[in-house]
Image (cartoon, rainbow, N blue to C red):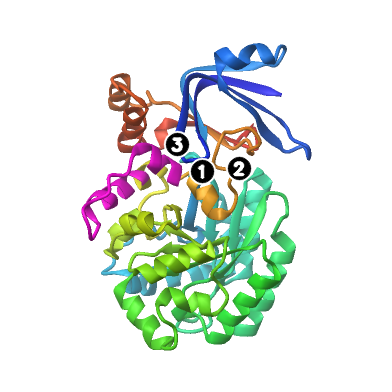
């Protein structure tokens, strides 16, 4: 058992923040030995209940759930910040040439280390990430995450057409490789597998059908892909799949819409698409820095709230411009205010934070497991220093309530505010 005394941020069942200025977080082994949150609350209410437990006092610090990144590309770590006219030219000129290098296991292993270092430096304790079409890239990333005791979900990209040499795979072999990777890595320690069609236009009917069959055969794996990110891409999907009602419906037609299915972007939706997301339990990975950078458009928060489907925040590195959850939350705030077809949505600081923690966990079907500091959750948390920089310190000193405190961190925070990260109870 180990206890920590500091300010404490967590979320209730309705997505509302619960904040104790002087809190206690107790970490101890669960039934299977995994370190879990055993108690969380006000120091005054809990301190006397655990005599003899060592307490680390962290004055001026905030204990918060580790961030969850719902969509990030591990092989695009070195593609971040590459200029392009839009999504499709960016893929052609930067992404595909770089991803071809991940056929080399040694190269993949080197990038995997840098990628996870960057995530943890920014306070991200669970990523849902694309590898490349090469099984070696999945092996490298899974092995690196396992060695750190990190919860991570990843998958081999499926792309058997409209892709250049070096990243294009072969239909039947791609499905055989995917199933072998599921059997080797899914549920191994804290690792999970995601069936990963790159996006519908890059996959043949046979490959999409096989992906749906894999998802049905292994119902506890995840599914991840892209949808409705870019208008040119949507027009292309319409030409390739004329029998489907919409781009999103393509995935439904091949059995790829269900709970634990995460679709990045979901920008150019109509209400029928939103209802399909809601009825199937699929979730959107909102990627605001990427959408702004590539000029793709804006996620419609008003539509998502009106119809009601799951969504959470994602960096989408390397189209996204930062690993930082603070930068992602701030970009989402801009999108809510300025990028709506109807009057802007003012996303509250608590909601923005929820979208990157407990809300993202809900989108993954891992509510109550990660993304929160309520009893029973895995002990992935960050120690935040709200005085990490002079301007941030000055701002939070004058915060009148929790919203002002959280918004100060969102606007002015970066990796310097992440003082320490704990994975399964241990410092990362």
Name the residue rendered at 59%, 71% in the picture: 134
375 or 200: nearer the viewer: 375
What number is the disc on residue 358?
Answer: 1
**414, above or below 173, in the image:** above
Element type at mark 2: loop
Is 372 or 187 nearer to us in this picture? 372
Of the numbered discs in the image, which one, if any, rests on residue 16? Answer: 3
- Picture quadrant where residue 393 is located: top left
Q: Residue at x 46, y 69 (%)?
A: 276
Q: Position of residue 203 (x, y in %)?
A: 51, 81
Nearer to us: label 3 or label 1: 3
Q: Nearer the viewer, residue 401 or 63?
A: 401
Cα–Cα gap, marks 1 and 2: 8 Å
273 magenta-colored: no
SS category of the residue bearing label 3: loop
Callout 2 environment at 10 Å: few (<14), some (14 to 19), or many (20+)?
Answer: some
In the image, residue 159 sits, relative to residue 286, either above or below, namely below
- Above or below 78: residue 323: above
Give the main secondary structure, helix, strand or loop, of the magenta stretch.
Answer: helix
Which quarter of the rendered picture does the N terminus lie within? top right
Q: Which residue is mark 2?
A: 368
Magenta residues span 329-355
Which residue appears at 57% of the width and 62% of the height? 259
Across and down, in percent, residue 296 comes to: 29, 65
**Among the two numbered marks 3 and 1 on one chain, the one whose residue lies closer to the N terminus:** 3
How many angstroms separate mark 2 from mark 3 (CA)? 15 Å
């Amino acid at each position: 058992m180990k206890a920590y005394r500091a300010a404490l941020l967590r979320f209730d069942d309705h997505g509302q923040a619960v904040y104790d200025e002087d809190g206690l977080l107790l970490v101890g082994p669960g039934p299977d030995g995994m370190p879990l949150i055993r108690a969380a609350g006000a120091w005054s209410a809990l301190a006397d209940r655990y005599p003899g437990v060592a307490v680390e006092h962290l004055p001026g610090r905030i204990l918060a759930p580790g961030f969850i990144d719902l969509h990030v590309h591990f092989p695009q770590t070195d593609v971040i910040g590459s200029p392009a006219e839009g999504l499709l030219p960016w893929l052609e000129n930067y992404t595909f040439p770089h991803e071809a290098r991940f056929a080399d296991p040694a190269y993949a292993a080197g990038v995997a280390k840098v990628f996870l270092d960057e995530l943890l430096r920014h306070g991200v304790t669970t990523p849902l990430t694309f590898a490349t079409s090469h099984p070696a890239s999945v092996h490298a990333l899974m092995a690196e995450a396992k060695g750190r005791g990190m919860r991570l979900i990843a998958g081999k990209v499926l792309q058997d057409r409209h892709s250049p040499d070096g990243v294009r795979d072969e239909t039947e072999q791609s499905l055989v490789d995917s199933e072998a990777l599921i059997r080797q890595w899914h549920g191994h320690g804290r690792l999970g597998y995601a069936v990963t069609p790159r996006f519908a236009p890059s996959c043949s009917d046979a490959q999409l059908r096989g992906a749906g069959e894999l998802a049905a055969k292994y119902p506890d794996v995840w599914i991840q892909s892209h949808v409705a990110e870019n208008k040119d891409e949507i027009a292309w999907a319409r030409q390739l799949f004329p029998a489907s009602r919409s781009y999103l419906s393509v995935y439904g037609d091949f059995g790829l819409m269900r709970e634990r299915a995460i679709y990045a972007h979901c920008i150019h939706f109509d209400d029928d698409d939103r209802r399909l997301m809601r009825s199937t339990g699929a979730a959107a990975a909102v990627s605001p820095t990427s959408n702004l950078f590539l000029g793709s458009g804006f996620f419609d928060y008003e539509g998502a709230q009106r119809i009601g489907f799951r969504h959470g925040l994602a960096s989408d590195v390397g189209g996204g411009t930062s690993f930082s959850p603070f930068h992602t939350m701030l970009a989402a705030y801009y999108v809510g205010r300025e990028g709506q077809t109807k009057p802007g949505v003012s996303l509250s600081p608590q909601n923005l934070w929820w979208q990157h923690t407990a809300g993202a966990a809900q989108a993954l079907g891992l509510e109550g497991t990660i993304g929160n500091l309520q009893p029973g959750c895995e002990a992935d948390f960050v120690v935040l220093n709200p005085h990490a920089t002079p301007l941030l310190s000055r701002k939070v000193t004058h915060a009148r309530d929790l919203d002002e405190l959280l918004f100060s961190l969102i606007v002015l925070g970066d990796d310097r505010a992440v003082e320490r990260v704990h994975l399964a109870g241990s410092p990362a």
